[in-house]
Amino acid sequence: MRRAANRAALLAPPVAFLAVFFAWPVVNIVAEGLRDDAGGWDLSGVGEVLGSAALRRVAWFTLWQAAASTALTFALALPAAHVLATYEFRGRRAISALVTVPFVLPTVVVGAAFLALLGPRSPIGVDLDETVWAILIAHAFFNHAVVVRTVGGLWEGLDRRTVEAARTLGASPWQAFREVTWPALRPAAGAAAAITFLFTFTSFGVIRILGGPEHSTIEAEIYRQTADLLDLPVASVLALVQLAAVGALLVVQDRLERRRAAVAVALGPPSRRRPATRRQRIWLGANLALMALLLATPLAVLVERSFRSSSGWSLTGWRALGERGRGNGLFVAPVEAIGNSLRFAIAATVIAVVLGGLAATALARSQSRLARTLDAVLLLPLGTSAVTVGFGFLIALDSPVDLRASPWLVPAAQAVVALPFVVRTMTPVLRSIDERLREAAAVLGASPRRAWLEVDLPLVRRAVLVAAGFAFAISLGEFGATTVIARADAPTVPVAIDRLLARPGSVNVSAAFALSTVLMVITAAAVLVVDRGRARRTGARGSWL
Amino acid sequence: MTPRLEVKGASVRFGDTTALDRVDLAVAPAEVVAVLGASGSGKSTLLRSIAGLQSLSAGGVELDALDVTDVEPHKRGVGLMFQDHALFPHRDVSGNVGFGLRMKGLPPAEVAARVTQLLDLVGLAGKADRSIQTLSGGEQQRVALARALAPEPKLLLLDEPLGALDRSLRERLVVELQRLFRELGQTVVAVTHDQLEAFTLADRIVVLHRGAVARVGTPAEVWDDPRSLEVAELLGFANLALLRRDGADLVTPWGTIPVGGQAVEGADAVLIRPGGVHLHPGGTQSGTVASRSFGGARSTLVIDVAGAPPLEADVPSADAPSPGSLVRFDIDPRQVRHLRGWKNRSSS
């Protein structure tokens, strides 16, 4: 009984937070869209959406581009996962860490990077702007790390003797992969596929910059319907459609995750080997080259373009960061956005880590059905249209207290988005702490409180750091909700980049790339700090972040 | 002399299953007791109960005549070495070994000095700064031992102390442990499923079966006369049969023995110890050697006797006949033991 009461006390703050800053705004805006002026239900939006060929096309495009993006991501990242998980070579640790960077980059920066690389002024002479290819490649860039982390994390732990056993039984390398390695990896691959699909299905920042008028996802369409066309009924129906689709996807993923837990995988100590044969060296070299091409080139071009103007090399883009006005679409000098972003992201990180830590502690101590349900509920923000959350804030948070002008509004929205990541990162680590370690501390004379300080806290500290790093990077890059609720005089960096790119003039474009470079450096630094913590971390292996 | 540890009628129930059934156990200061049992016999539960990690459903635990039944584990002053060690992965060797000393509030300099001393004792001198992950299995075992010994516990509990190690290392370490405990005058209760480990380590053996004490005695006593079928089987004895009498004679499937063994109350089975089968040409019984396994100085024969279960015989390797040979033998009445428990087994 006491334990149940403790759990309830731990869960109350995060649940209350999500009720106020997630459920209430979303319910409000959806209801708003589905009611007429007299307050009755008006479901004309449903018919409008279902009857519109254009919107059906959006839904269809959302679905197939997500599937295609997932397939492309796997085609590029699975070989990378193999190389990083099984080969030892110079610089492997550094490359493993750097490969994670794209995943935490703000989607707007990813969009900007690919606009620079594959846009009208492409340095490699390939103009894919406003084509599907630019979108797919950008999505593959963004989600590469999901596959490498999830699948590779398991792959490096597989007991290689199972493969050797297969080889001695007459299997070729390919047969050994198909018969032994792949079945062990499949559940992790399934989870990675579900997550990649989820992220690309709800893609907004990349689509907004690279999509053009032809290609729109449901999420981008929700923004257009609400902000540009002021058609709330259609936006509400679209938000519901997306929520339903994502809900179905989460159910599928949950199944896969549970199967993953159920499959007995033979784990051994990491046993990387230097490539021995010529063929292995070529395979390693080719994969490293491909990673450099896919992951490093866009970022390099992004930086390069920030130093370009219409007349060649120049610092005008960087100088413009400090200038107010001048038709940049902002009410402040772009450089101020950096301060805003840092302040908001730090506040959001604190909220997300404290609340997520409480939730994870409660969830880790229980295997009940209620806990599993809550686990799923806490993931909901991951699948909900961030744009919808943003607009929900604007119409719902005016009473009883008007929070809309509060400086905490943006951090609250960003914390809603970051919370699922924090819970997902911390719960498995908390669960994985061996009960016997606490017992060992107890028989050595540590009181329960002391045991928590000496055992739980040090073991979780790294997970907290990892969670905080990701929450920070996610908050820093959050675009969908922030672009709706950020005050015009206090834009964040992603919002400023979006505004700059929407304005004409090469100075604005260079300034956007310069700002993207700044954001990239900050998030990369955050994730590299996290990764150092992760390298020394013990416990849960192969979690998807 | 007051016992260091006294367990009185300790019972532990998990729902419908009884893990410990009214166990009594007294351990004198400086005595080493091994609790021997198959997996699921309740031996780990007994150990956890003594450490205070498992609360009793009934009965009590006393340390130095003080009732500690309701005392929390961290206040009992009992050391426990876990199966697979449970070393703190986030602390290095000295951090693990010094943990209990820090909990006692010793100043860092004293902790460091004592850690050095303990690492010397267990043969890990100079490895204080090593991380736990870089240690071999044997080294981890030594760290776990040093960690448990550091606070100078009144009583040291060992849970399968050498369980995961390979055979040659185990044989070496068990001798080291035995010498160490004797030198330190350490009171120890060790739990194991390995009889050789128990025999080497302990002054006294307690055999647990289904949560209850099945036999207590010195290693020699227990080995000589298991007293019950369960204990005999746990120790790996063959040649077990239902006890039948014909007047004063003992009737076994392998032949009738005049006055075999000392009568035990309630006994319903007999054991013929492998050394009790004497091969000689004038023997009264006969059979065929089915197999022979070489065990160094002595070998084990399995002899097929018409109309009876296979009979195991322990003979000098030099005299061991090859499989297929016809042999004659006698059973030495002094090597026959009476056991309880045949009835229980056939009914279960």
Image (cartoon, coloured by chain):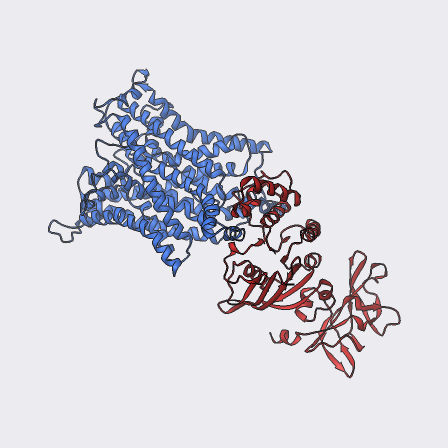
Nearer the observer, A236 or B81: B81
Nearer the observer, B248 or B81: B81
Q: Is residue A182 above or below residue A324?
A: below
Nearer the observer, B313 or A447: A447
Instruction: Decide if residue A64 is in sight here.
Output: no
Residue at the (25%, 48%) spot, across then down: A20
Quick one: quadrant of the N terminus of chain A?
A: bottom left
Q: Is residue B77 above or below residue A111?
A: below
Quick one: quadrant of the C terminus of chain A?
A: top left
Residue A60 falls left or right of residue B2: left
Residue found at the very far right of the displayed protein: B282
Residue A241 falls left or right of residue B80: left
Residue A427 falls left or right of residue B267: left
At which x and y percent is residue A199?
35, 42
Residue found at the very far front of the displayed protein: B1
Q: Is residue A331 above or below residue B238?
A: above
Q: Which picture quadrant has residue A115?
A: top left
At which x and y percent is residue A387?
26, 41
Q: How many marks?
A: 0
Residue A117 falls left or right of residue B64: left
Chain (blue) = A
At which x and y percent is residue A510?
30, 23
Residue found at the very far left of the displayed protein: A38
At which x and y percent is residue A256?
42, 51
Instruction: Decide if residue B339 is in sight here.
Output: yes
Residue at the (26%, 35%) spot, across then down: A214
Chain (red) = B
